[in-house]
Image (tube, rainbow, N blue to C red):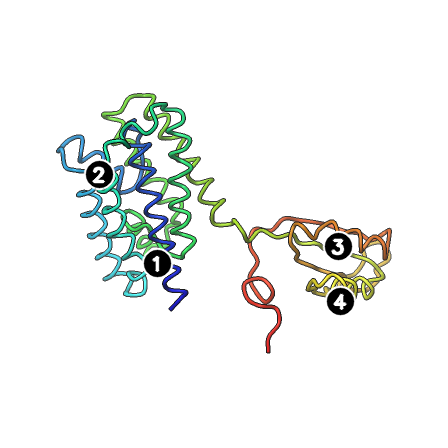
Amino acid sequence: MYKHIKTIMLIVLGNLILSFGVTAFMIPHHIIIGGSTGIASCMQYYFHIPLSYTVMVINVVMFLAGYFILGKKFALTTIVSTFVYPIFLSFFQSIDALAHFCDDMVLAAVYGGIIIGLGIGLVMKAGASTGGMDIPLIILNKKKGIPIGTSMNICDTCILVTQMTFSKTTEILYGIAIVFVISNIINKVLTYGVSQVQMFIISPKYEEIKYELLHNLDNGVTMVHIETGMNELSQKAVLAVLSNRKVNRVKQAVLKIDKQAFITISQITEVDGRGFSFDRYVD
C-alpha cells in the first residue's frame, strides 16, 4: 500500500511541475511545444477553445483507447495523469501572476525546458505515462512494432509544424531547442540516484583482493573466469560495483595488494539486485 501511495504521489508531483512549467514559461511567450499541449495550443489559437479543455478531451479519448487496446493494467498507470494534468493546467492558468512570471524569453526557454523535463521525468520514473499523445505511440509500438522514439519524433514534428503557421521564427527556434533540453533532463531524472561505478580488476592476487573487498571494505564482488592474452593463463578477475565515494578507497586497497594490477573503471547508469535495489543481507 505504501509503495502504491508513493507512486501516485510521484505521478501527481510530476504533473504539478509539468503543468507549472507549461503555464509559467511556454504559454506566456507562445513557445511551441509538442504532445497534447501543442495540439491544444493550435485549438486555442484557431477556435478559441481553452487549453485545459482540449487537453482533457485528448487525454480522456487516448485513455479510453489505451484501456480497450492495451488493457486495464496499462490504463491504471495513466489514469492519474489523464485527469490530474489538465486540472493543474487549468488551476495555474487562473493565476494571472504566472503570465508575467518570467519576462525574458531566453530564461523562459531554459527554465521551462528544465521544469517540463523534470515533471515528465518524475512521472516516467514512477513507471507511468503522462497520457495524451504518448498512448497512440505505445499502441503503434505494440501492434506494428514501430519504435516509440521514432514515432514520437514524427508526431512532435507534425505538431510543431502545425504551430509554425501562427508562431514567430523566434518562438519556433526556442521550441526546437526546448525539445533537446527536455529530453536531456528526462534522462538525468531517470538515472539520478542510481548511477554507480563498475570496477574490473585483473591480478594474480585475486583471492586477496576478493577478501579485502568483501571483509574489509564491505563491498560485493563477482569472480569472472578469464584467460590472459600474452601468457594464456587461466585465472579469475574481480568485478565490483560500488558507489562513487568508494572508488578511490577500493583502488588504493587493490594497488596496495598488487601494484601491477590491471584496473578498469566505468560509469553505469543503473544497478538492480541484492545490495542495490533491495537489501544485501536477508534473515
Left or right of 230 on screen, residue 192: left
Q: Nearer the viewer, residue 235 or 123?
A: 123
Distance from disc 3 to disc 2, alpha carbons, whole Å, reads: 54 Å
Foreground of the two, 9 or 252: 9
Q: Amino acid at mark 1?
A: Ile
Q: Residue at x 54, y 63 (%)?
A: 277
* Label annotation for residue 250: 3
- Name the quadrant containing residue 119: top left
Q: Secondary structure at mark 3?
A: helix
Which residue is identified by label 4?
215
Local SS, label 1: helix
The first of marks 3 and 4 along the sequence is 4
**Mark 1, residue position:** 8
Where 237 sits versus 269, above or below?
A: below
Residue type at numbered disc 4: His
Residue assigned mark 2: 40
Q: Quadrant of the N terminus?
A: bottom left
Q: Amino acid at mark 3?
A: Val
